[in-house]
Amino acid sequence: MIAPQTNAGFVAAMEDVLEVYQRPHDPQRPVVCLDETTKQMIAETRAPIPAAPGRKARHDLGYALLRRFLGIVRPA
């Protein structure tokens, strides 16, 4: 949540950012977006145990970290 005393400054800064996204495409000055949240690709370390009569499927909580990445995209 944004504190009320900072709302005007935040909104002004966000409008500046949104204005950049509205610029026409210029190959000499490409615009990219940077996602501030990292994402992880993980894999299960053990095969899940399938469901059986009277029992739900079971999944181990362990995982292997495959890769972390930061998303960078060019706006359409």
Image (cartoon, helix red, strand yellow):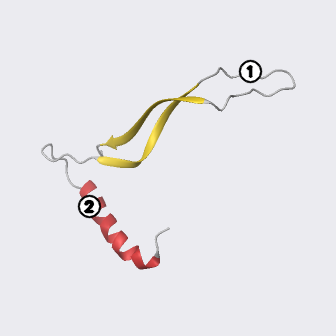
Q: Residues within 10 Å of mark 2 (few under 14, many from 20)?
A: few
Q: Nearer the viewer, residue 59 or 33?
A: 59
Q: Quadrant of residue 46?
A: top right
Residue 20: x %, y % from top left? 24, 57
Q: Secondary structure at mark 2?
A: helix
The residue at which mark 2 appears reads as: 19
Q: Label 2 vs label 1: CA separation?
A: 52 Å
Q: Quadrant of residue 8?
A: bottom left
Residue at screen point 81% across, 21% down: 52
Q: Secondary structure at mark 1?
A: loop
Q: Nearer the viewer, residue 57 or 26?
A: 57
Residue at screen point 36% across, 70% down: 11
Give, as a three-letter code, the residue at label 1.
Answer: Pro
Along the horizontal axis of the image, is 43 left or right of 32? right
Asked whether the residues under the numbered discs 2 and 1 touch, taking CB atoms below 8 Å apart as contact, a structural biologist would say no
Q: Is residue 57 above or below residue 22?
A: above
Give, as a three-letter code, the residue at label 2.
Answer: Glu
Residue 16, label in figure: none
Along the horizontal axis of the image, is 10 left or right of 57? left
Q: How many marks?
A: 2
Residue 73: x %, y % from top left? 32, 42
Residue 3: x %, y % from top left? 46, 74
Residue at screen point 38% across, 41% down: 70
The residue at which mark 1 appears reads as: 50
Q: Residues within 10 Å of mark 1 (few under 14, many from 20)?
A: few
Residue at screen point 77% across, 23% down: 51
**First-in-chain label (2 vs 1):** 2
As drawn, the residue found furthest toward the right would be: 54
Q: Nearer the viewer, mark 2 or mark 1?
A: 1
